[in-house]
Amino acid sequence: MASVPGTRGLDDNDRSRQLHMTMNHPALLLASLAALASACPVSAGTLAERLVGTWSCVSGPCPDQRVAFSGSAEDPEYNAWRDGRSSVSGAHWVLRGDRLHIACCAAVGSDWVVVRADAEELVLLDEYSARLATLRRTVPAVAPPGK
């Protein structure tokens, strides 16, 4: 049997218990996901550029039904909508490594770990509930010719 890192000297029963503990304890699962995310580092500039745009919630505890990250690194802006109405306007977002902080609503904010951000999908890990939120990029509507 191939050696699994961190399990040297453990028999199959011990490995099974270790895997069971990791999968059934949110704190251990969160640590494992954070380690996995840091194993494939992405520069903050590139990640910030990938966040810019409008996203719609697909599943999980999303920040809101629809969110938009815009602005420059010096003045990042966050807006959100629920049921077609603005729920947050002109808030700020800060990205430090893979940690995303959305500051809004009189000092109330939310903290996320960016697990994946590509051209179509954004996956965030809610630092408080240790649950994943999946959002899809919203393609901007094309204006009719002549308008």
Image (cartoon, rainbow, N blue to C red):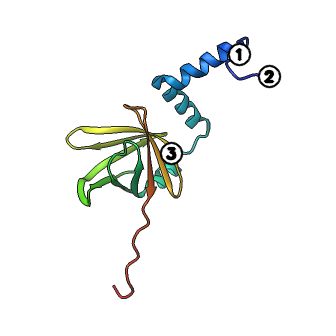
Which quadrant does the C terminus fall into?
Answer: bottom left
For the residue pair 92 and 20, the one nearer the viewer reads as 20
Q: Is disc 3 placed on a helix, strand or loop?
A: helix
Identify the residue at horizontal 52%, vertical 46% (top origin).
Answer: 116
Question: Relative to 41, does residue 12 appear above or below in the rendering?
Answer: above
Q: Which residue is mark 2?
A: 1
Question: Relative to 129, does residue 78 appear above or below in the rendering?
Answer: below
Quadrant in the picture for residue 67? bottom left
Q: Residue 83 in the image: x percent, y percent?
A: 26, 57
Earlier sequence position, callout 1 versus callout 2: 2
Question: Relative to 38, does residue 116 appear above or below in the rendering?
Answer: below
Which quadrant does the N terminus fall into?
Answer: top right
Instruction: Please say whether residue 61 is visible from this viewpoint.
Output: yes
Q: Residue 77 in the image: x percent, y percent?
A: 32, 53
Quadrant in the picture for residue 128? top left
For the residue pair 103 and 81, the one nearer the viewer reads as 81
Q: CA distance from mark 3 to mark 1?
A: 40 Å
Task: Indicate which disc residue 12 carries.
Answer: 1
Task: Indicate which disc residue 44 carries.
Answer: 3
Left or right: residue 56 compared with residue 104: right
Residue at the farthest right position: 1
Q: CA distance from mark 3 to mark 2?
A: 39 Å
Question: Relative to 5, does residue 77 appear above or below in the rendering?
Answer: below
Q: Is disc 2 placed on a helix, strand or loop?
A: loop
Q: Residue 107 in the image: x percent, y percent?
A: 23, 38
